[in-house]
Amino acid sequence: MRRALPADAPSLAELRWAFKQEDEGVPEPPDAAVFLRQAESWIHDRLADGRWSAWVAEAAGAIRGHVFLQPVERMPDPHGDTAPIGYVTNFYVAPAHRDRGIGTALLQALTDHARAGAVGTLIVWPSDRSAPLYQRSGFLAPDELLELILDT
């Protein structure tokens, strides 16, 4: 496990492609080359300027899994509760490397970072497959969160 670097963007873009193809099950996916260029640039820029953080798991010299964190700033509060909220997303382990503790280790690296003062609360929209891992790691259903899905 290690923090992702901007130089990891090409590998992270390829894993994002694999993740979304597996997740969406699209029979005719969009043009891979166009997506990979866009995703690589997007990932590189956000890791380089610190807007996002990510952790990667490597095996046999290649990145096999990742998880991303974006701190969401909060408004100033006279009571001092201004720690950012951490949005956890793009959590993926390549199928051949699952069930080996990689996902748990990635999530632990991210939560260790958060507990060290980076954010006050972590939020995630889990898939059916990932929800048990999040729950084992201490994530709970919120009491106060509401969402409005907009048709955009």
Image (cartoon, rainbow, N blue to C red):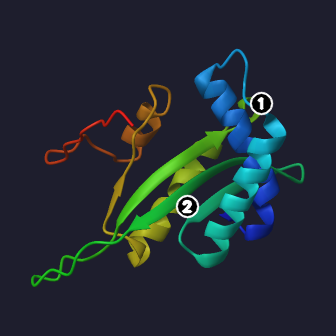
Where's the C terminus, which quadrant? top left
Label 1, label 2: how far apart the Cα atoms are: 21 Å
Q: Quadrant of residue 91?
A: top right
Circle 2 crowding by C-alpha within 10 Å: few under 14, some 14–19, many from 20: some
Q: Residue furthest top?
A: 27
Q: Would residue 107 be found to the left or right of residue 148 on screen?
A: right
Amino acid carrying mark 2 in the image: Ala
Does residue 25 sit above or below 74 in this rendering? above
Q: Would residue 128 be found to the left or right of residue 16 on screen?
A: left
Where's the N terminus, which quadrant? bottom right
Any part of residue 113 in sight: yes
Q: Would residue 117 be found to the left or right of residue 60 on screen?
A: left
Q: Which mark is residue 107?
A: none
What residue appears at the point 37 percent right and 39 percent down from the top-left corner? 135
Does residue 26 sit above or below 58 in this rendering? above
Q: Residue furthest left?
A: 79
Percent position of residue 51, x then y = 53, 71
What residue appears at the point 39 percent right and 62 percent down from the top-left corner? 86
Percent position of residue 58, x then y = 78, 53
Does residue 74 sit above or below 42 in this rendering? below
Judging by the rendered image, the residue that carries numbered circle 1 is: 96
Amino acid carrying mark 1 in the image: Ala
Percent position of residue 30, x then y = 73, 30
What residue appears at the point 30 percent right and 36 percent down from the top-left corner? 149
